[in-house]
Amino acid sequence: MLFAVLTICTSFTAVKKELPVIQQEDAVAMEISLNKAREQVLKLMTFNMRYGVGVDDCLDLNRVIETIRDTDADIIALNEVDHLMPRSNMQKQDKIIAEQLGLYFAYGYNINLGSKYGNVLLSRFPIKSFTNHPLPKSSFSEPRGLIEADLDVEGNHIKVFVTHLSIKTKERPEQISFIEKKIKESEGPTILMGDFNSLPHSDEMKSLLDLMKDTAMEEYCTYPSYQPEARIDYILVSDAFEIKSNKYIGTQSSDHLPVVAEVVLDQ
């Protein structure tokens, strides 16, 4: 009987010695989990999709959709998106893309003659509100715009801007000044994406790149996609974000190459 009691006590003591090890592993796992919870990793994409016309001059919206889908991006800026335009077979491209990908969307059209043309913001997260601002331009230039949207990213308020600047060099400085003003008015984490039709080291981009961080970690070219010679497509972020990666994506679905960046919002 005494032997039995001693055996039980010995076994209990052995188990008791293992408990601190198990607790330490749990603590490490919990710490990792908490760190991940504090960090919001976002995959961003900007893509001038040329209303679905690829380098082969064929209209194929499915190629655009699959290009976007393959990146698994969370927040996407699209330029040159048609809505009921004859040249794109009267497609409602904004709605088709959003529905096929199962994403929220905001359409900022800059031309509206019944048929529409402009920029789109796609998001895995709810778009709480958005405004499409007309950008300054001369009398006979193509209208350009700036989508300003408020996103609810798992409880975090993030401001996202999407734009496509003029091809006219003389118009872009005033358009960039307008965008800078809107960014300075914003509070909290901010993202700016789109086709700027400007080179990284141009005078017109200098003040904007002083205000926002360029996610590109090395120089590359995005246009034209079949023989890239210039980087004119950008993903810029405020200081609230840490940049993890940035790359262009090879595709035949447009005359621009898409750009994808991963950033971390430190909560």
Image: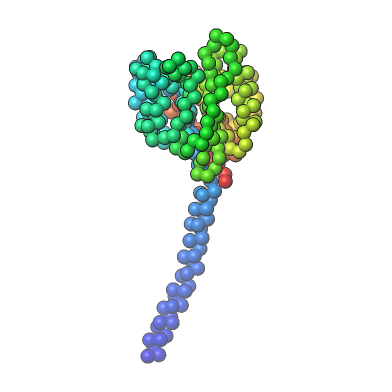
Pick the residue in front: 157 or 264: 157
Q: Is residue 39 visible?
A: yes
Q: Is residue 2 above or below residue 192?
A: below
Q: Is residue 239 above or below residue 78?
A: below
Numbered disc total: 0
Residue 137 in percent (x, y) is at 58, 14
Q: How is the image coloured?
A: rainbow
Residue 231 in percent (x, y) is at 52, 22
Q: Is residue 4 above or below residue 184?
A: below
Q: Is residue 74 visible?
A: no
Q: Quadrant of residue 138?
A: top right
Which residue is at a point 36% across and 29% down the rendered structure image?
A: 66
Pick the residue in front: 34 or 127: 127
Which residue is at a point 47% across and 38% down the rendered structure image?
A: 126
Residue 196 is left or right of residue 78, and the answer is right
Residue 44 in percent (x, y) is at 49, 34
Residue 267 is left or right of residue 225, and the answer is right
Furthest-front residue in view? 114
Which residue is at a point 48% across and 57% down the rendered structure image?
A: 29
Q: Quadrant of the N terminus?
A: bottom left
Furthest-top residue in view? 140
Which residue is at a point 34% across and 21% down the rendered structure image?
A: 60
Q: Is residue 252 above or below residue 32?
A: above
Residue 214 in percent (x, y) is at 57, 30
